[in-house]
Amino acid sequence: MNKKKYYFILLFALLFCSMYKKGNSQTNAGWQPIYLLISGSNIMDGIEADFQINTCNGEDIVYVKFINHSAYPVKLEWFDAVFSQELKWINKDKAEDKKSLILPASSEAKGDCLNNKFPELIVKIKDFVADKKDFKRYSSLHLSVTAVK
């Protein structure tokens, strides 16, 4: 599938889902689903994904959370992407921008300002948009889940 078609389908799915879900990340400090499938589901291959807008040391941050519902460890790989208020995807998709994480069976990993245990799960909003008001939602672009043997 070419990139334009992929982005069109993803945009259509997000717009379709937004009609049924209330949510504007600027006003919601709780966890919001990261749409991993066209259907709007935030669970794929036993992995649940969510994001949260917050601040860390005075900086606007996106915290990412992954929950492994599988009975085996997995390796996650993805690129960070932000959907702007202008309805445009801004993504970091060069090889050096790829993030990865080994997630043990039946466990959770999430970004946290205090202990910084998972720095790959902390995303600076300013790396994508100039102002938090321009941010609409976060996505883990091209998320892949591989069982670790």
Image (tube, rainbow, N blue to C red):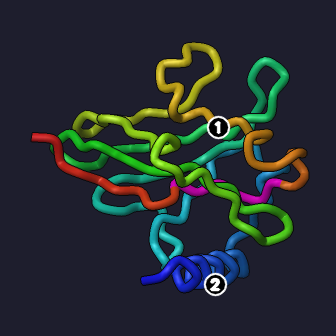
Q: Label 1's element?
A: strand
Main structural element of the magenta stretch: helix, strand or loop? strand
Q: Residues within 10 Å of mark 2 (few under 14, many from 20)?
A: few
Q: Quadrant of the C terminus?
A: top left
Q: Which residue is mark 1?
A: 123
Q: Quadrant of residue 74?
A: top left
**Is 58 a magenta residue?**
no
Q: Label 2's element?
A: helix
Q: Position of residue 111 (x, y in %)?
A: 56, 31
Q: Nearer the viewer, residue 122 or 2?
A: 2
Left or right: 69 with respect to 123?
Answer: left
Q: Quadrant of the N terminus?
A: bottom left
Could you tell me if the residues under marks 2 and 1 are in contact, i.e. CB atoms within 8 Å? Answer: no
Q: Which residue is mark 2?
A: 12
The amino acid pointed to by label 2 is Phe
Left or right: 24 with respect to 146?
Answer: right
| Outermost top residue | 115
